[in-house]
Image: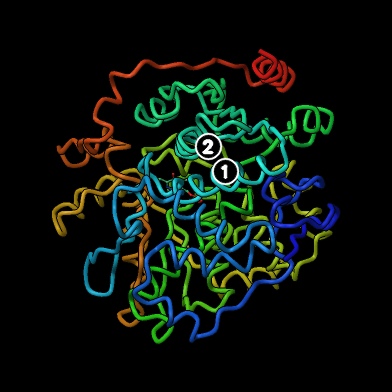
Amino acid sequence: MHYVSTRGQAPVLTFEDAMLSGLARDGGLYVPETIPQMSAEDIAALAGLPYEEIAFRVMRPFVGDTFTDAEFRGLIDAAYAGFNHDARAPLVQLGQGHFLLELFHGPTLAFKDFAMQLIGQLFQAALKRRGERVTIVGATSGDTGSAAIEAFAGLDNVDVFILYPHGRVSEVQRRQMTTPAASNVHALALDGDFDDCQARLKDMFNDFDFRDGVKLAGVNSINWARVLAQVVYYFSSAVALGAPHRKVSFTVPTGNFGDIFAGYIARSMGLPIDRLVVATNQNDILHRALSGQGYHKGETIPSISPSMDIQVSSNFERALFDAYGRDGKAVAQLMEELKSGGFDISQGAMQALREIYASGRVSEEETSAQIAASLKGTGELLCPHSAIGVKVAEAHLDGATPMITLATAHPAKFPDAVEAATGVRPPLPSRMADLYERPERLERVPNDLAALQAHIKGKIAG
Ligand SMILES: *Cc1c(COP(=O)(O)O)cnc(C)c1O
């Protein structure tokens, strides 16, 4: 199994090297050269299996010979052992033909744990074997950072630095990043917004002296291994609702396009997915793009769904790569245009995207109203991101195809927004009830590449 860059100018890599490097050296993102197929019988055979076994069968063909079967099974088991629900990703019914996939039973209460817990295990196993140490730098709008710090804290072969926008993450998100005591993890509060964090991260990857000097590795959703881990719950949930004998659709609260792109991979592998519906908040670049208005950056406006406050959606590049017939040159050209504000999507590519994706946008007021309506109608207390998914999904129910909406975080991760909408303050699960008492540790950093690089080098040396 080989991985190629979306910009066509970087070396072709194995799974292990694509995972450990994150961003390709031509600035592109790694994607599999070909997509392994699962037949209807393969998919039917997943029915009733434990989540970990489904994970093994779905991901195995992508991993090549990086891990033996026994090793890979062990790593998957270890990754999900810390989840608080035996089903890992349970489905609940919201209404006629509408289901909620609860992806918030991991250690940091958001779906990011599905990928991060696994790649913590995969990184550790691969680095140990190589006798190497790497520096992981990540950018976060809140949930990636907490999931990464939780997954990598205390591991021998990695130093982790997480850039988050100072003052723009929820208190629970911040505390999940700043309270782990392990000395190999660092929460960096950057003076800027999430797009600044993501831009500085890309700058670091494009500075090859720095990149090679500190052995930089990335665990943002641009890392292929993260996308791969998320493919699994599309299979487990679709099969629970009757796939491959019945089609299903998914609605996904979307920011960086990683989670929904995993659904596209599941579909490309043979899972009968009818539509993949992108749900955005007021930062709606993806909704505008999929509505035919081109891909043009706007200003990021802070919202009550901060994990989706994104105007440059990294993984959309992977979707464009396929929509443009895997033409790396064309993608590189579009990304060049993006630097000066944006680009229009060709007619052919729009047609390809529209066959797969639909979209909707939800305002702040509508988000709050949906949180209240869901509590009243179903007893479900939704986080704002999940509420955006439910609202958009309801507009796309067609009466025939079951719709699965991804619940991306636990309501207790965003208690202020949930309380403002409902009057109910969602309590933290008991295993993390003392989060507000634990001491915090964070490092303030400027929105400046050279200063950041010096800071990171200093911490590694110390
Ligand atoms: C990260 C995140 C999202 C967006 O996921 P993408 O893969 O970036 O599209 C949505 N909701 C929550 C709670 C998140 O943490």
Whether residue 341 sits left or right of residue 292 in the image: it is right
As measured in the structure, the alpha-carbon distance from the residue carrying label 1 to the one carrying label 2 is 6 Å
The percent position of residue 337, horizontal first and vertical second, equals: 77, 48
Along the viewing direction, whichever of 431 and 125 lies nearer the viewer: 125
Residue 22, above or below 176: below
Circle 1 is placed at which residue position? 311
Residue 81, above or below 262: above
The percent position of residue 120, horizontal first and vertical second, equals: 54, 42
The circle drawn on residue 300 is 2
- Inspect the image, locate mark 2, and give the three-letter code of the amino acid beneath it: Thr
Is there CB contact under 8 Å for labels 1 and 2? Answer: yes
The percent position of residue 13, horizontal first and vertical second, equals: 78, 56
Whether residue 394 sits left or right of residue 288 in the image: it is left
The residue shown at (52%, 57%) is 229
Q: Quadrant of residue 34?
A: bottom right
Q: How many circles with numbers are drawn on the protein?
A: 2
The percent position of residue 29, horizontal first and vertical second, equals: 71, 52
In the image, is the residue at mark 1 within 8 Å of ligand 1 by its beta carbon?
no
Local SS, label 2: loop
Whether residue 347 sits left or right of residue 441 in the image: it is right
Local SS, label 1: loop
- Mark 1 Cα within 10 Å, few/some/many (few <14, many 20+)? many
